[in-house]
Amino acid sequence: MRYSIRSGCVMSWVITLAQVPYQVTISVRFKNDDHSVCNSIIKYSEKLLTCVSPMVCTLILWYFSLIQLYRRHHITTSYIRTKIFMGGIRYIVAGRFIDGSGAAVCQNIFLAVKDTIITAIGPVADLPSQDQTAIDDFSHCTILPALVDCSVSLSRSPSVDAKVRLALAEADLAQKAALCERHIYYCHSYGVLGVAASDELTDLGPYAQKGQAQKSIVDIRTSGRLCRSRQDCAGDHSVGGDFLKIGYSGNIDDEAALSVRLSPDDLRRLLQHKGEKKAVVVANGRQQIEDALVAGCDAIEQGYGIGEDNLQKMVENDVLWIPSVLRAKNALDAAGSGGDVCCRFSQRYIAPGQSLPGAEAFWKKVLAEQLTQLRLARQLGVVTAVGTGAGSVGILHGESMVEEMKLFIKAGYSLEETIRCASENGAGFFGMEKLGRLAVGRQATFLVTRGTVQQLPRKLSYLEAIYVDGSPSGTYNKNPIKAPLLTE
């Protein structure tokens, strides 16, 4: 028997009896923190399981005996869930299904999951009819792949308060590790289960270590130090990091955005020695982007002012584009309101500040041009992926993903194409094997949203459920009893 206890949250048991093709999962949410009661329940359960015959009727009897124990201890539960899987197979029904390949939405679909893998997908009418088979019924919901953000900084705060950012920049390793954990929690809560992070490995703390990163609730790929100059790029890049990220231009929302810090020869030498790693180059301006493409990069991030010629070259060389349109949208919102404070529950600035003359017109033009180029990229067949730049000023971890997806749709992408850009394309590029499109033989990790397809991507801000490896996520809770105190 395997069990776990989290104070004030969920206690769950997973019982698997040898030589019996049945598995029972019981999850109980307590409104109190009485560990003595929890321990007595565990001891009682273990004693029962050592005495009973491994038959389904016995398991049901054990379950109802446990209910009587709850009543005797006067424990108040908010819910009790029991699932019985015939032959170890879980069946999940979806009213609407988006597989992440770009194909059209399917209606009334079932998924069969065994040993964390999708073994069958088909119409509900073909669902095997077994009286004792438990089905996870999401006929009122939409199922879609988990999201992947191709550009984040987990160790940086998106606060628009310069004092907050400065204080966090000078924080010790323990504080930075706590900040990373908080941002990972935010990402997971919004269905972002994969991220490509450009933090210093030391700032990521335990999440920079392969073993620890694999245990994280979010699949993390790291670049290590962002190369912005010859000094940054000195040394052996084969050590540490899953991919190479080079800042050939500054970020578009930085003052020195188009100031080239590496020469074309420096960039070429770096990419010649990248080994087997993928190389992502941050480049803005037509010439800088052309330099990066000629040097042999694998992906262009931001790419403002890219131009049709460069887009054609990206198609020919199979180069990924991560347009990060939200950076321009965020800068436009800030310029329009002159805001100084950004609310965690809104992408817009909410406090008055000093606006810059001409800034609003400038960012309106930049945003319009980037959307035009993204529309052209779709027409030409450029492979694109969603990367928000979360951790930059005003760009929040997790929830910014929805805003970037809305901008893809504004540029002419269909919802299905947008979800492919937000899942499969990024997962495939960064080697996140457990994420991406949903198909037979792939990992059963996906999101469940209530409502219709027309309500996406907005409904991603409030998920009905998150499934990881075929089971409901033990971390995600749609209606938490005790919300953790999380502040920047």
Image: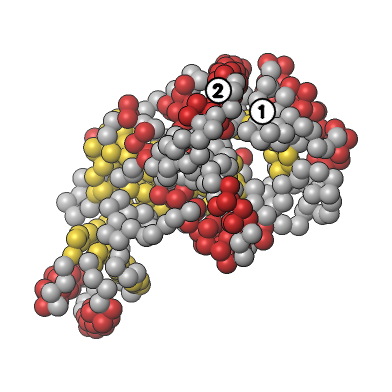
Q: Position of residue 456 (x, y in %)?
A: 36, 31
Image point (61%, 61%), residue name: 171
SS of the residue under disc 1: loop
Residue 218 seen: yes
Q: Residues within 10 Å of mark 1 (few under 14, many from 20)?
A: many
The residue positioned 23% from the left and 71% from the top of the image is: 32
The residue lying toward the viewer, choosing from 202 and 100, is: 202
Circles 2 and 1, Cβ within 8 Å, touching? The answer is no
Looking at the rendered image, the disc whose residue lies closer to the viewer, 2 or 1, is 2
Residue 173 percent coordinates (x, y): 61, 65
- Quadrant containing the N terminus is bottom left
Front residue of 181 and 59: 181
At a point 16% along the width and 72% down the height, the residue shown is 75
The residue to which callout 2 is attached is: 360
With respect to residue 487, does 39 lie above or below?
Answer: below
Position of 467 with respect to 411 (left or right) is left
The foreground one among 37 and 131 is 37
Q: Residue at x 69, y 39 (%)?
A: 280
Residue of label 1: 303
Q: Amino acid at mark 2?
A: Glu
Q: Position of residue 286 (x, y in %)?
A: 74, 22
Look at label 1 and name its amino acid: Gly
- Tag count: 2
Extreme residue toward the right, this view: 265
Q: Is residue 13 above or below residue 421?
A: below
Q: How is the image coloured?
A: secondary structure
Q: Dot 2: within a 10 Å radius of its alpha carbon, few (fewer than 14), some, or many (20 or more) residues?
A: some
Marks 2 and 1 sit apart, C-alpha to C-alpha, by 20 Å
Q: Looking at the image, is mark 2 or mark 1 earlier in the sequence?
A: 1
Q: Secondary structure at mark 2?
A: helix
From the top left corner, tell me how far across and down residue 6 is, in percent.
34, 69
